[in-house]
Image (cartoon, rainbow, N blue to C red):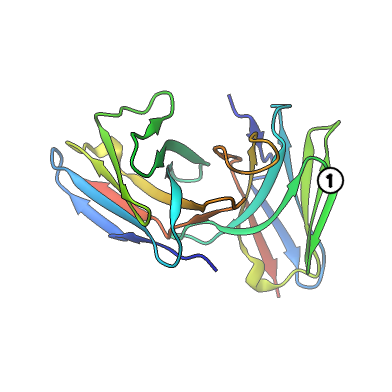
């Protein structure tokens, strides 16, 4: 099956620093990648949709300058949380979709804790 | 506005019995539905999906039923096994019978299968 990896799996940082999270499709080319955020005991909330070579499309209420997304290749998308604050602490999950394929394949997630 | 709802936060079932997980949606434009299984600190894993042109899809122990008039779908697991214990999310999409579009997730239901 399709494998999606995320790095790092867990990160703790000080308030005001920026954190980069990588999402890679390991055995397929993903034309589209999605970034989700999950709060404890809550649903996965879509933050943005990222297509290779173009700007990401952000969901309403998500600050594009706060959450920078770069989809530089068909196997890599990055999410940078800029000037992180404690309220940004969350579980961030990416997913990737193969071209002409129905399902999204999810990465294992990244636990971000901002002190 | 929660367009996809899983009203049961948890479900406890005896091993060997049937597990029935329910999901309701409000957006009549949704035409493709998926179920994901998620363990703590991991990304969701795709289980089974159904297009709105069908009312049932079966894959091994997993069967998804769709009642469009009631805007309701359910996932049946039979027989239930302790390894099925996880959080189950239903998700919906409105991209021409595919999940090409973004997925809207329910809040999840914690399934516990007792030996």
Left or right: where B40 falls relative to B28 = left
* Rendering coords of residue B112 (x, y %): 65, 62
How many marks are shown on the rendered structure?
A: 1
Residue that carries the numbered disc 1 in the rendered image:
B54
Q: Residue A112: give x, y in percent of width and height.
A: 29, 50
Left or right of residue A63: residue B108: right
- B62 relative to B104, above or below: below
Q: Give the side of residue B74 with respect to residue A40, left or right.
A: right
Q: Is residue B112 above or below residue B28?
A: below
Quadrant of the image occupied by residue B3: top right
Chain containing mark 1? B
> Which sits in the foreground, B79 or B45?
B45
Q: Residue at x 69, y 27 (%)?
A: B27
Q: Which one is in front, B48 or A88?
A: B48
Tag 1 secondary structure: loop
Residue at left 38%, top 49%? A91
The correct choice, above or below, for B86 with respect to A38 in the image is below
Res B62 → quadrant: bottom right
Q: Give how far across and how far down residue A63 sits, in percent.
A: 31, 27
Residue A76 in sight in this render? yes
- Look at the image and tell me whether residue A115 can be seen: no
Expressed as whole percent of the image width and height from the top left, the position of residue B99 reads: 61, 44
Q: Quadrant of the N terminus of chain A?
A: bottom right
- Identified at 75% across, 45% down, the residue is B51
Q: Around disc 1, counting alpha carbons within 10 Å, would you say few (fewer than 14), some (14 to 19), or many (20 or more)?
A: few
Q: Quadrant of the C terminus of chain A?
A: top left
């Amino acid at each position: 099956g399709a494998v999606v990896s995320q790095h790092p799996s867990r990160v703790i940082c000080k308030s005001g620093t920026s954190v980069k999270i990588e999402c890679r499709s390991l055995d397929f080319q993903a034309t589209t990648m999605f970034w989700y955020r999950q709060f404890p005991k809550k649903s996965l909330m879509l933050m943005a949709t990222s297509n290779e070579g173009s700007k990401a499309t952000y969901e309403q209420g998500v600050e594009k300058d706060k959450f920078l997304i770069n989809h530089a290749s068909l196997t890599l998308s990055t999410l940078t949380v800029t000037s992180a604050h404690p309220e940004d602490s969350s579980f961030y999950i990416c997913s990737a979709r193969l071209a002409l394929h129905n399902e999204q394949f999810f990465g294992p997630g990244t636990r971000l804790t901002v002190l | 506005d929660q367009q996809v709802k899983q009203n049961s936060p948890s479900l406890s079932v005896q091993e060997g019995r049937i597990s029935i997980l329910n999901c309701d949606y409000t957006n009549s434009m949704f035409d493709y539905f998926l179920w994901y299984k998620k363990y703590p600190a991991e990304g969701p894993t795709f289980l089974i999906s159904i297009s709105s042109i069908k009312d049932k899809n079966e894959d091994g122990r997993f069967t998804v039923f769709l009642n469009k008039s009631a805007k309701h779908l359910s996932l049946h697991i039979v027989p239930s096994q302790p390894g099925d214990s996880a959080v189950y999310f239903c998700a919906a999409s409105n991209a021409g019978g595919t999940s090409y579009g973004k997925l809207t997730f329910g809040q999840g239901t914690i399934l516990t299968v007792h030996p």
